[in-house]
Image (spheres, rainbow, N blue to C red):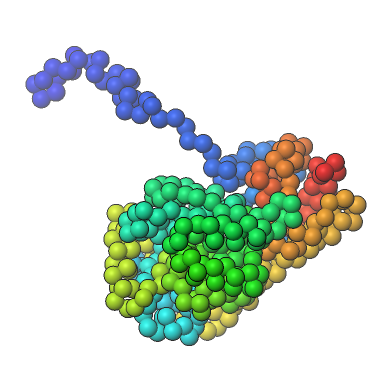
Amino acid sequence: MVIRRGVVIPRSLFGARSICSWWKNVEPAAKDPILGVTEAFLADTSPNKVNVGVGAYRDDNGKPVVLDCVREAERRIAGNLNMEYLPMGGSVKMVEETLKLAYGENSELIKDRRIAAVQALSGTGACRVFADFQKRFQPDTQIYIPVPTWSNHHNIWRDAQVPQRTFHYYDPGTKGLDFASLMDDVKNAPDGSFFLLHACAHNPTGVDPTEDQWREISYQFKVKKHFAFFDMAYQGFASGDPERDAKAIRIFIDDGHLIGCAQSYAKNMGLYGQRVGCLSIVCEDELQAVAVKSQLQQIARPMYSNPPIHGALVVSIILTDPDLKSLWLDEVKGMADRIIGMRAALREKLEKMGSVISWEHMTNQIGMFCYSGLTPEQVDRMTNEFHIYMTRNGRISMAGVNTGNIDYLANAIHEVTKSG
């Protein structure tokens, strides 16, 4: 017996069964298909192991990179700026500069204050806040998601309780865009449907529509009165030119669409752990934009109250200082160019090995990822026989390829695809 405040309590009530009974029905969660690859890689003791599953940039020595422009921005922050709470909508300056990247330096939408925008927890947070906004204010709608897409897109709209449908995107036969089927799905979807689109460097395939194809997509969206929500995680990182990578968004804006957009500075500034991004929604007028922004802030309030300040300060300093912005543009182009170079080099090595498979898609695709065409069984061989780690859909992170491992990687790919 235990006596507390004069009350006798049986010791059995303090047993392990009582303590654990609250969560006895909780099962271990399934491993994330992307993050699980890194866990397996770290557990491997082979000296030859290679990780081409991680979605983060590495230099030619396989090391993480902090950009020089970021280092300088942090130097200016240190000891000079306070760390008070940001407003619910985040850093006004960071948001202003971020909108210029997406919509254009001289955008009439920005001048007319027609864009409702808030700082978000990188691209993931931007997508999640929008998904909740969609559920709250368009509760009878669904979201059409491309096949394939970044796996977390499904989790985000699922947890926001927005019903999901899919539309055709990738053609395994050509390892390119299935444009005809995509357009059929756009035409056959109910009028006023919501579609998730990758603005550039589609993840995981690296396959983007051409400019003419984007114009056709935009036209059909207008005919069907669809809403386009763009996830733009790789602006500048895809081609090395932020203006070029925003082309799809500019086409839709020129055609008069009211779009939504998620932006992230994880890839193009290397601010992976800072979780800095932006959610924007184009509105009919300034009054509507004020109302929409207020609701986005209300959604953010119980989620995380307000966004973190450090990454927002870094971005603001870089984008408002002409010299630092110029340095950033040089550095982001350098990252993009290294990845483009690795694509060409890997394709060349495979062709010189006498591979009977066409690897043209490797250089046709763009951005961090190459959708290699390797089957799940071939990926398993890559891991089990060569200690090379990637997701089982055959996605190779070209950021993990460098001059030190490219020969080993090419040889392994050639070995597992010889019979293919």
Please state the horizontal and vertical placement of residue 418, each as a whole percent of the image.
85, 43
Where residue 16 sits, quadrant-wise, is top left
Q: Foreground residue, 250 or 74?
A: 250
Q: Foreground residue, 347 or 406?
A: 347
At 51% from the left and 79% from the top, the residue drawn is: 254
Please state the horizontal and vertical placement of residue 300, each as a whole percent of the image.
33, 59
Tell which residue pokes out farthest to the left in this image: 6
Image quadrant containing the N terminus: top left
Q: Foreground residue, 222 or 81?
A: 222
In-image side of 223 versus 215 (left or right): left
Please state the horizontal and vertical placement of residue 373, each as a whole percent of the image.
73, 49
- Would you say residue 216 is visible in this rendering? yes
In-image side of 100 versus 288 (left or right): right
At 87% from the left and 50% from the top, the residue drawn is: 356
Image quadrant containing the C terminus: top right
- Would you say residue 400 is visible in this rendering? no
At 64% from the left and 49% from the top, the residue drawn is: 53
Please state the horizontal and vertical placement of residue 151, each as a whole percent of the image.
54, 49
